[in-house]
Image (tube, rainbow, N blue to C red):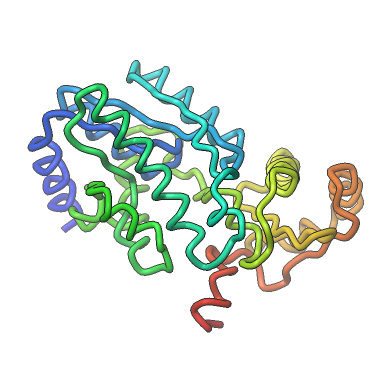
Amino acid sequence: MYSEKLQKLISYLRGLNSLIIAFSGGIDSTFLLYIAREHIKRLILFTSVSAIHKSRDIEDARLIAQDLGIEHITIDTKELLIPEFIINDKNRCYYCKRNLFKNMSKIAREIGISYIAHGVNSDDMQDYRPGHRAAKEYGVLAPLVYAGLKKQEIRRAAMEMGIKIWDKPSSPCLATRIPYGQRITLDKLEMIDRAEALLQDMGYKEVRVRHYGDMAKIEVPESEIEGVIKVRDEILKGFRQIGFLYVTLDIEGFISGKLNRIIEGGN
């Protein structure tokens, strides 16, 4: 079944003469890139370098494109100039993705690229993702979904292919760390970026820092909670230098999409 999905993906990509990929530097879009470069004659990568994306992820995207020798377009998509986005309601992701795909569509027309794709996978379709609506509006392809590939299958295939970041944790945009209804600002995004970088430098690969005004709430996998408590003084010092007056640790542990509970009514 797994190998059949890969063949289905390859067959799909072979039918495309030219493609521009929304490239975040994460494992999904990187895996799509590795497969696509073998089967598509003209391939372009597009990365948003706006403040809503982690600086390290942007650098990862640059390095991967450079190492593979793939043409890479980077543009500040300026989400913070979109009023509907910064008010941060439940459709925030839709406004963000609509802006992204609008920029990509414009570039595709200008340089003669026939198709646009993003690295969404089959598992993503089960979560609350209003950005999928924007993708449909702009005719953006989802090759990994078409092939039925799930996250763990993508990681397995990437590992077998020797892709170095096969186990890189998922890293959605920084705006997802700000609870719905709280305004998105550059200061908040920069604080979150710096705080998560601090924790990653301490060895915590999968981490979220939720921004609640003067308070930061740290999420790490349940197995790492005790370790965070042991280095609390170092974390407190670093977070206060960043600008947080209060620091809490979520004892439930890291759960992707936790802030969507207010919409889904889940537990």
Q: Relative to 257, say whether 104 is above or below.
A: above
Quadrant in which residue 249 is drawn? bottom right
Quadrant in which residue 194 is drawn? top right
Please state, as top left, top right, bottom left or bottom right, where the N terminus lies in the image. Answer: bottom left
Picture coordinates of residue 174, whole percent (x, y): 60, 49
Q: Is residue 219 rendered to the left or right of residue 56?
A: right
Q: Which residue is drawn at 72% across and 38% down?
A: 201
Picture coordinates of residue 70, whole percent (x, y): 33, 20
Picture coordinates of residue 24, whole percent (x, y): 44, 38
Picture coordinates of residue 87, whole percent (x, y): 61, 59
Please state, as top left, top right, bottom left or bottom right, where the C terminus lies in the image. Answer: bottom right
Q: Residue furthest front?
A: 83
The front one of 6 and 211 is 211
Q: Is residue 75 rendered to the left or right of residue 148?
A: right
Q: Residue at x 41, y 63 (%)?
A: 129
Q: Which residue is drawn at 52% across and 68% down?
A: 90
The front one of 91 and 119 is 91
Evaluate whether residue 224 shows in this view.
no
Total marks in image? 0
Q: Is residue 103 rendered to the left or right of residue 75?
A: left
The front one of 110 and 193 is 110
Q: Relative to 156, say whether 226 is above or below.
A: below
Q: Residue at x 17, y 52 (%)?
A: 5
Evaluate whether residue 101 shows in this view.
yes
Q: Is residue 258 rendered to the left or right of residue 238?
A: left
